[in-house]
Amino acid sequence: METKKTILIIEDEKILRESIHIGLESDKFQIIEARDGEEGLIVALREHPDLILLDLIMPKVDGMTMLKKLRSDDWGKAVPVIILTNLTSSNEQRNNDVVELTPSYYFEKTQMSIDQIIEKVNEILF
Amino acid sequence: MPEVKKYKSRVVPLLFILILVSSATYMFYAWKQSINTISTEALKVAETAKLLFSEKEIDELNINSTDVDNNEYQHLKSHLMEIVSLNKNVRLAYIYVQRSNKLFFALDSEPASSKDYSHPGQEYTEASPDYSRPFLYGKSLITKSSTDRWETLISVLVPIKNNETGKTVAVFAMDYPASSWNNEALLSVVRIGIITLAVILLFIIFVILNNNNKIKERADQVIKDKIKLETIVADIGDGIFVIDKDLKITLFNPKASEISGFSIDESLGRPYHEILNFEFEKTGEVNDVFIKQAFATGKIQEMAQGTFLCRKDGKRVAVTDSTIPLKDKNNNVIGCVVVFRDITKEKEIDRIKTEFILVASHQLKTPLSGIKWSSEILLGDKIKTPSIEQKKYLDNIHSSNERMIKLVNDLLNVSKIETGIDLTSKRKKVDIFKLVEKVFEDNKTLALAKNINIVNVGNLNQELFLNIDEGKIREVLDNLISNAIKYSKINSKVDISCIKLDNDILFSVKDDGIGIPKYQQKRIYEKFFRGDNAISQETDGNGLGLYIAKTLIEAHGGNMWFESGENEGTKFYFSLPIY
């Protein structure tokens, strides 16, 4: 039997977190959640998920700070991260950060349906 | 006005020349006239004096030395002497006769002791042929001036005739020194000359006074203009400094002093780069290319965005504005006017505005994302499938939410457009044919729902990389293609084409839909505008799409246009430059 891929959803909005969770739920994935960047980093470094879905604007530690810390870890530097945010990606500095912190993918939440997110996750993991 | 000035500048010398020429002509005429008057007067005097001498009295003379003792001779001589004494200008008076074609003195006005005396019968050897003419023609005449043993003289000759025969028996002559006539004529010329000089002098005084007045008026105007300009330059809200061709500051206004921290006194006369350091915001490198370029090209130059001025106290101030070259008559750049403005506050307001838009749109989008994904979960097969009726209302929630998401995104775009944010900031090399193909594929589902045959023609299976902001061009393509499908009839056709021209790519999308009424075509790119027929057919749509699309295409250096008629379909085009 194929090993389930672990996906970590780091999202402070409960409704959004649950929607993605339900959408991704299947035999292929094991879903774990975190409610902010700080918790997300702890869970990620402990659980070593196969992929992280990351929000940017969150309490305690924001998504970009969390990502930078994650990339400074030996394991964390290679894990694929899908940034899902509603911040418009017109900020030059943020774009540069994303480029430097690869492998990362940047999507606007309102521009992505649940099905498109699942498709992207499958594309990256399989 | 320059034509009038040119005309005026020619009038003065022409008038001057005219006065000189007319004066010279009049003086010449006066000289001639004066000589004529003197001659006429002299002739009258001579003819009157001649009446003192009768032909009989002369006939009685022997015309030799024996006449001296003759009373008649003495009587006649006394007349001659009297004539000379009464007429100051007459040098000599005498009577001569002609014998055998020779002329001989009969008597003269000089006493015997005078060196100028000629005794009776003495031949008049110096006489010119003129002296014989009264004998020949019997008429009075005035000889030309001639020099003889006495001096240069003019003679007035009057014949003394036999009353019966009319024959000239002797000639009465009065000699005038030529100088006396010339002096008299000269006097009248001098009189005219003095008048002329006076007129010229008056004319010159008039011209000078007139010019002085004009110069004074001009000087007053220049002073007024200078004061006005100085007031404007001093009170203007922008920093202004002027540099000469040696790059030295020749003017530095109070605002420039306020922005830079350098006083006017410490700035004037110094090369601008010694005190005014314009730098790039990011690199800190010197950025005075806008000044150098103004000198090099002679054209107005704008400062690059993100220019900072390093103040005297070391603080950096965000500035903007331009350099205007100053040119001489030959179009050579002789200096520059640099105008600059402290835009610290504007930059801060811009930053706050941009931040506000980003945060506000994020705050709006978060609940919209929640509704979107929640309704997608409800509509999907992850949980209990909703009833047909429930599904209908869930669809409504989902589609209304999609419209709201589009509206928020469009408003965000409009806001970006109007705050002047660079709409092409994420330019990179993108294969335009591939991008069109992607958007075409994305819209196939939408077309299928209305059974519309959507066809992509043009340069398929080719590559053409354009330097564009992919997200923005994708938005334009999606807007145009989805509009074409939305406003097309069921079972109709939509043609998409993207072809390479010489310097551009030309994209077009053609539908057989409701079209745009002619009377509303001018307004189609206005914000929130929707055609009447579009509103009645499709309640969806916010009227921002075409405004945004056109602005995005133009921000990429392209153009957008359309061909349409109500119920005749619409064909939208846009071009993008290839570089």
Image (cartoon, coloured by chain):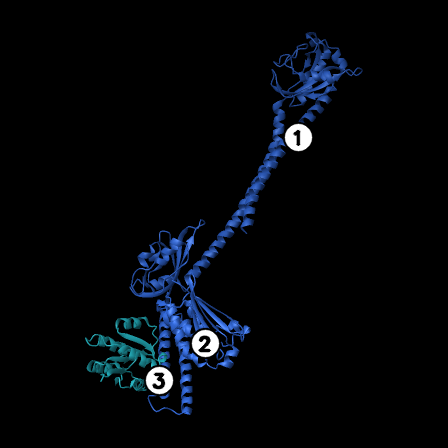
Chain colours: A cyan, B blue
Per the rendering, the mark at residue B33 is 1
* Front position in the image: B250 or A17: A17
Which element carries disc 2, helix, strand or loop?
strand
Give percent across and percent down for residue B441: 39, 75
Q: Find residue B198 and report its image quarter.
A: top right
Which residue ends up furthest to the top in the rendered image?
B66
Question: Label 3 marks which chain's residue?
Answer: B
Q: CA distance from mark 3 to mark 1?
A: 124 Å
Q: Quadrant of the C terminus of chain A?
A: bottom left
Element carrying mark 1: helix
Asked whether residue B456 appears in the rendered view, the answer is yes
First in residue order: circle 3 vs circle 2: 3
Q: Which residue position holds label 2? A: B453
Q: Mark 3: which amino acid?
A: Trp
User: Which is more toward the observer, A57 or B310?
Assistant: A57
Q: Which residue is mark 3?
A: B373
Q: Are marks 3 and 1 in contact (CB under 8 Å)?
A: no
Question: Is the residue under label 1 in contact with that under label 2 (CB below 8 Å)?
Answer: no
Q: Is residue B459 above or below residue B269?
A: below
- Chain label for disc 2: B
From the top left corner, tell me how far across and down residue B114 is, in percent.
Answer: 62, 14
Q: Is residue B60 left or right of residue A53?
A: right
Mark 3 or 1: the one toward you:
3
Q: Amino acid at mark 2?
A: Asn
* B531 relative to B369 in the view: left or right: right
Q: How many marks?
A: 3
Label whose residue precedes the other's in the sequence (3 or 1): 1
The picture quadrant where one finds residue B112 is top right
The label number, if any, that marks residue B401 in the structure image: none
Q: Position of residue B298 (x, y in %)?
A: 41, 54
